[in-house]
């Protein structure tokens, strides 16, 4: 068994497709800091089972907003990005020695 702790940064783009006439598709950047505790359990000399939980803390958080067509310049609905997120992963690791 081997526990590890990783820190890092991640970034990308949040894309919203539009299917309604008159509504534009939007792409907005995001940046987050991440911390990931990981546990690797060796099954054999070369294979292990990996379990990790990544905590994601956005630094740049986009907000998708839809304008209300009946009121000029007003936002009808908005979808903010949550203040924190998590990713849980379970996988197999192969080591070449």
Image (spheres, rainbow, N blue to C red):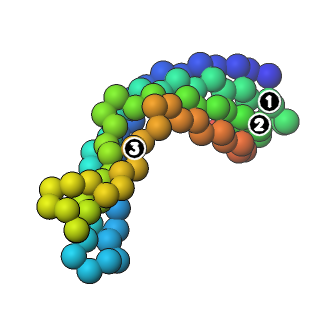
Location of the C terminus by quadrant is top right
Residue 55: image location, x then y, percent? 55, 29
Residue at 66% in and 32% down: 52
Residue 73: image location, x then y, percent? 15, 56
- Residue marked by disc 2: 48
Name of the residue lying farthest toward the front = 71
What is the CA distance from the residue labelled 2 to the residue labelled 3?
38 Å
Residue at 50% in and 31% down: 84
Q: Is residue 47 left or right of residue 32?
A: right
Instruction: Name the element at disc 2.
Output: strand
Residue 94: image location, x then y, percent? 69, 42
What is the CA distance from the residue labelled 3 to the residue labelled 1?
38 Å
Instruction: Name the element at disc 3.
Output: strand
User: Which numbered dot is residue 80?
Assistant: 3
User: Which numbered dot is residue 21?
Assistant: none
Q: How busy is the neighbourhood of tag 1: few (under 14 within 10 Å), some, or many (20 plus)?
A: some
Question: Which mark is first along the chain, 3 or 2?
Answer: 2
User: Which numbered dot is residue 41?
Assistant: 1
Using the rendered image of the protein, determine whether residue 96 is visible from the camera's viewpoint: yes
């Amino acid at each position: 068994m081997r526990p590890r702790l990783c820190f890092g940064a991640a970034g990308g783009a949040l894309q919203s497709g539009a299917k309604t006439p008159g509504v534009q598709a939007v792409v907005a950047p995001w940046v987050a800091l991440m911390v990931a505790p990981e546990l690797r359990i060796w099954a054999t000399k070369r294979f292990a089972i990996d379990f990790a939980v990544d905590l994601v803390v956005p630094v740049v958080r986009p907000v998708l907003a839809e304008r209300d067509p009946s009121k000029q310049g007003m936002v009808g609905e908005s979808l903010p990005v949550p203040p924190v997120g998590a990713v849980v992963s379970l996988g197999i690791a192969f080591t070449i020695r």
